[in-house]
Amino acid sequence: MNDSRDKSPTPGDETPYVEMPDVLKGRRQLAVDEKFCFGCHPGVSCFTDCCRDINILMTPVDVLRLSRRLGITTTEFLPKHTQMPVTKKLHLPVVMLKMGPEPEKRCEFVTEKGCGVYEDRPWSCRMYPIGSALPPARAGEETEPVHFLFEDDFCKGHAEKTEWSVESWKADQGLEHQEELEKGFHDIVSHPWFIGGQRQLDPKRMEMFYTACYDLDTFRRFILSTTFAERFELEDGLVEKLEKDDEELLRFAFRWLRFALFAEPTMKVTDAASKKATGGTMGSES
Ligand code: SF4
Ligand code: SF4
């Protein structure tokens, strides 16, 4: 198991931030090719100790994969297995994995043999001991994540001899496909619209973001059970793909959000719809 992370608030995850998250302050920053030693396996004395009382921010793909693994919808998964932190520093809603009850607050997925959802474990669990954050957007610049090394005393994995770089660790953890799939998500959370950290989405748009990114089954209903397909010019065959293909739907959700949140021309309204009122955002559909 190469899992788990940090007991501090907001562990290694790509957190959209206005200020550097407290948990990353003072951590050693890692250049992409910088080496560090680490190993996590059933032989370490701390095995699974870290799978409790931790804050794991969930990405859209994490929510999707875990809900599918458990055989439930994202709509069922979210209230059952996640919670939303309340902090003024975040400009978009985030969801965190819910821990089990006090006093241990163990992750509900940990077993004696390690992570019980290993193949579908969250992004943060794969990334540890690397932390990552997206700096604030700057005009005309593509935002690149900044990486840090967690060197926590409780984690004995740092005494192991295997040498890694950020890149080789990510490849070992199978993160490449997830990161490619979530590129559109990162483009939204680091969008230039947020430059300066002063602008806030209104509650309706916050809800759109939450639904499209995390509650994909509700988003699918929004696409398929409303007048959505009549109001936007969609590529041939796209609706059928969105009906069946979760990854296609997630990519589409990020594309739609850029239109709905920032008025980018990622979608085209049909002539018939443009003659009507400009409404028709999520939640006002019939
Ligand atoms: S999801 Fe798996 S790796 Fe992550 S905290 Fe829970 S048991 Fe540990
Ligand atoms: S080595 Fe670190 S990541 Fe692995 S189980 Fe121990 S505390 Fe967790």
Image: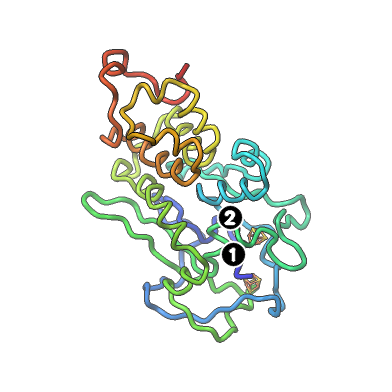
* SS for callout 2: loop
The 10 Å Cα crowd at callout 1, few under 14, some 14 to 19, many 20 or more, is many
Residue lying at 67% horizontally and 48% vertically, measured from the top left: 70
Taking the image as shown, residue 52 lies to the left or right of residue 22, namely right
Q: Which residue is mark 2?
A: 56
Q: Quadrant of residue 133?
A: bottom left
* SS for callout 1: loop
Residue 11 in sight:
yes
Relative image position of residue 245 (x, y in whole percent): 49, 43
The answer as to whether callout 2 falls within 8 Å of ligand 1 is yes
Q: Quadrant of residue 134?
A: bottom left
**Which residue is more in the foreground, 3 or 175?**
175
Residue type for callout 1: Arg
Residue lying at 43% horizontally and 76% vertically, measured from the top left: 165
**Which residue is more in the foreground, 141 or 19?**
141
Within the displayed image, which quadrant is ligand 1 positioned in?
bottom right
Residue lying at 72% horizontally and 78% vertically, measured from the top left: 45
Relative image position of residue 138 (x, y in whole percent): 26, 51
Disc 1 and disc 2 in contact, CB within 8 angstroms: yes
What label sits on residue 57 in the rendered view? none
What label sits on residue 5 in the rendered view? 1
The answer as to whether callout 1 falls within 8 Å of ligand 2 is yes
